[in-house]
Amino acid sequence: MTARISPFAATCMVVANMIGVGVFTSVGFQIGGLPSAAPVLWLWLIGGVLSLCGALGYAELVAMMPRSGGEYHLLREAYHPLVGFMAGWISLVAGFSAPIALAASAFAKYAQHFGVDMQEQLLAAALVIFMTAMNLTNDRWFGRILGGFTVLKVCLILGFIAGAIFLPGGVHNDLLPKAADQALYLSPAFAISLVYVMYAFEGWNGAAYVAGEVQEPQKNMPRALITGTIIVTLLYIALNAVFLWRAPWGQMADKPEAALIAAQSIFGETGGKFMGFLIAFGLISTVASMICAGSRVNERMGEDVPFLKPLAFQNKAGTPVVSVLVVAGMSLLMLLTLLRML
């Protein structure tokens, strides 16, 4: 396998996989059971440390066995081909196709917040199809496209944080620890809130799925996994600090649209549209990255399992065409099923 993905693109893949809707929807549920800023911020730090532990473990394993495929490849080599095969099919259905469908559906809903006049089902499907087409291009071009989307997503988040710091209007809540916080750290609400945090941190292993295509994987894969996880951890802590500092807690509590409420508090009436744009734009790179990662699991299975050999077929650019189309097709099928259920 020719190394075609740069270290920067691999790092962007980690960041793109991690930053989805979770960080924008969790804080409302957290403050419903934890009415203090310090415990909530500690939750995000704990989530980052736990994710970094996972990234360090993956970094070691991928450096030892630098081949694409993620859990499929690692479990196959560490335990048995059957274990890897089972993990591969779970990844196809639950690990990638379903999250891609959910992310595309969320993209459509948020895009409609800032005036995109298109039926939700068509808009979500259009995103999956467009990102599938991008995945079928040369990996170098795809890496640049993914890198560009990811950098812009991070810049939008930093812009939101800067606005909260420098714009004077709105509320200013106290973020300092309180004496009553000690009881909250041992409460059931703290443990339940950690579930939301870990959901938001999912994707820290994103680059492991394309390890065999990364330049100098023994050196660059650990850097990509660790750097990407640290970047997202810092962004998550800063973003939630902003939500807690500048938004009315009474309106945010137990609400999934807490980020929209915070944006309106900071930026006024246009804040909701800005936040909707930020989330929708961010989901574009998430969908693109997950299609890429999922297809590499299928490709590795096609190389190892004789009756799945078509999944390993590559075009002239070295892209596993059949595998990409299988992930996209399964995602579209789940998207149609999901929207009929909602």
Image (spheres, rainbow, N blue to C red):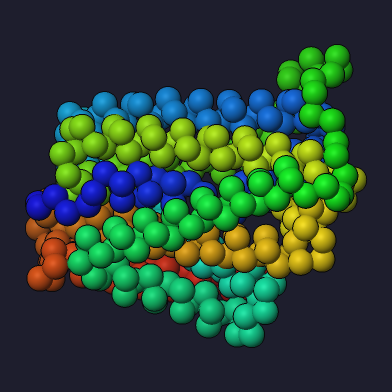
Q: Looking at this view, is 284 or 330 the one in front? A: 284
Image height of 77 relative to 282, above or below? above
Q: Which of the pair 286/157 is nearer the observer?
A: 157
* Residue 80, visible in the rendered structure: no
288, 91: nearer the viewer: 288
Left or right, residue 199 beside residue 300: right
Residue sitting at x 44%, y 46%: 15
**In which quadrant of the rendered view does residue 215 lie?**
top left
State whether residue 42 appears in this view: yes
Q: Is residue 273 left or right of residue 251?
A: left
- Where is the C terminus found, in terms of image quarters? bottom right
The residue drawn where x is 68% and y is 30% is 41
Quarter assignment of residue 281: bottom right
Along the viewing direction, whichever of 179 and 255 lies nearer the viewer = 179
| Residue 170 placement (x, y as % from top left) | 86, 49
Q: Given the current orientation, which residue lies at the most extreme right position?
A: 250
* Residue 88 spot, x, y in % from top left: 29, 50
Residue 38 x %, y % = 75, 25
